[in-house]
Image (cartoon, rainbow, N blue to C red):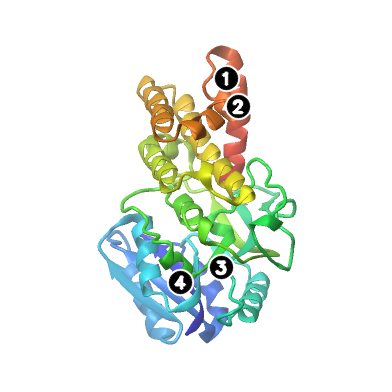
Amino acid sequence: MKLLSVAIPCYNSAAYMRHCIETLLPGGEEVEILIVDDGSTKDNTAEIADEYAKNYPGICKAIHQENGGHGEAVNTGLRNASGLYFKVVDSDDWVNGEAYAKVLDTLRRFSGEDDALDMLVSNFVYEKQGAKHKKVMNYHTALPKDKVIGWEDVKVFMKGQYILMHSVIYRTELLRESGLELPKHTFYVDNIFVYQPLPHVKRMYYLDVNFYRYFIGREDQSVNEQVMIGRIDQQILVTKLMIGYYDVMKISSRKLRHYMIQYLEIMMTISSILAIRSESEENLRKKKELWQYLKQKNFPLYLRLRWGFLGQGVNLPGKGGRKVSVAGYKITQKFYGFN
């Protein structure tokens, strides 16, 4: 069994996927790099995947599939993973070598059946094109460092400070046991990837290293604000799916419950802010319908989110409402690092 499986979803990624793969190769034979070619047709992504599989047969595996979107590429990676742990690295991102060695060392220490971690959390860096100062998302306020903890040991997550796909490595079997299956042809499913398995996590560990480098700057990138407004239906769909996975108000662990409610709050805020910033009547109707959906699906959760600071902010009329909306927007910027 491999120590770590890394899935790299690739869709017409020829211009940058080599850099991503090269930063992962130093993991050697302990690491399995699953290069998932998601039906690329516009460039030689498929050939590059095959080239790495041929040159590094003990490490790299090329998997070709019909186009199913980012979520289906992650699903395929998970189905093919043989590692004890599972990580997703997007093809335009990369990892830091020094931090990578520390991550593997930590996973190695917890590779026995009885002491395996459910989740390893590390920092990520917003590699924003043109920015001199690189913002780091760390978890100093939220998680004790260098020790195995449970949800009861969690400290304070600040607004905009969330565990994202970039910062998490899950135990592979935990993801399978949780029934994780990301929807096809849908953007923003990385939120589901992080959120849905959380109640299954009992043993976690925070390693304070700047491991993942999250590139922001391409005009066609899914976190470009205008692109997100154009895909608001998918953002809303992902939010609705997340609302439906659990009745979060009934989760027994107080700190886990609080964290998951906060996560749904940011998802509602993002959808609402995108609708407001689009200045489209149709999108404002969709925003209203989303809040109605939440009200029908889980009324106690609706009350909690609708009358919280952000919920009020994105539902207030006039200039005063827009001012509070800007505060919500700044939090969503921190969450996604809009470009």
* Residue holding disc 1: 322
Where is mark 4, residue-wise? 173
Q: Are marks 4 and 3 in contact (CB under 8 Å)?
A: no
Reading the image, the residue beneath label 2 is 326
Q: Quadrant of residue 179?
A: bottom left
Q: Amino acid at mark 1?
A: Arg
Q: Earlier in the sequence, mark 4 or mark 2?
A: 4
Is residue 191 in view? Answer: yes
Considering only vertical position in the picture, is 170 above or below 265? below
x, y percent for residue 272: 48, 30
The residue wearing badge 3 is 118
Q: Distance between the Cα atoms at labels 2 and 3?
A: 36 Å
Q: Earlier in the sequence, mark 3 or mark 1?
A: 3
- Look at the numbered disc 1 and give the secondary structure of its residue: helix
Alpha carbon of mark 4 to alpha carbon of mark 3: how far? 9 Å
Instruction: Let me know if residue 44 appears in the view.
Output: no
Q: Identify the element where label 2 is drawn.
A: helix
Q: Nearer the observer, disc 4 or disc 1? A: 4
Q: Specify which label sits upstream in the sequence, 4 or 1.
A: 4
**Disc number lying in front (2 or 3):** 3
How far apart are the alpha carbons under marks 3 and 1?
Answer: 41 Å
The quadrant of the rendering that contains the C terminus is top right
Q: Report the amino acid beneath label 2.
A: Val
SS for callout 4: helix
Classify 10 Å Cα crowding around label 2: few (below 14), some (14-19), many (20 and above).
Answer: some
Inspect the image, locate mark 3, and give the three-letter code of the amino acid beneath it: Asp
Q: Quadrant of residue 17?
A: bottom left
In screen coordinates, is 67 left or right of 52?
Answer: left
Q: Would you say the residues marked 2 and 1 are in contact, meaning their CB atoms lie under 8 Å apart?
A: yes
Q: Residue at (68%, 56%) from the top-left corner?
A: 152
Most extreme residue toward the top is 318
Find out whether the residues at labels 4 and 2 contact each other: C-beta distance under 8 Å: no
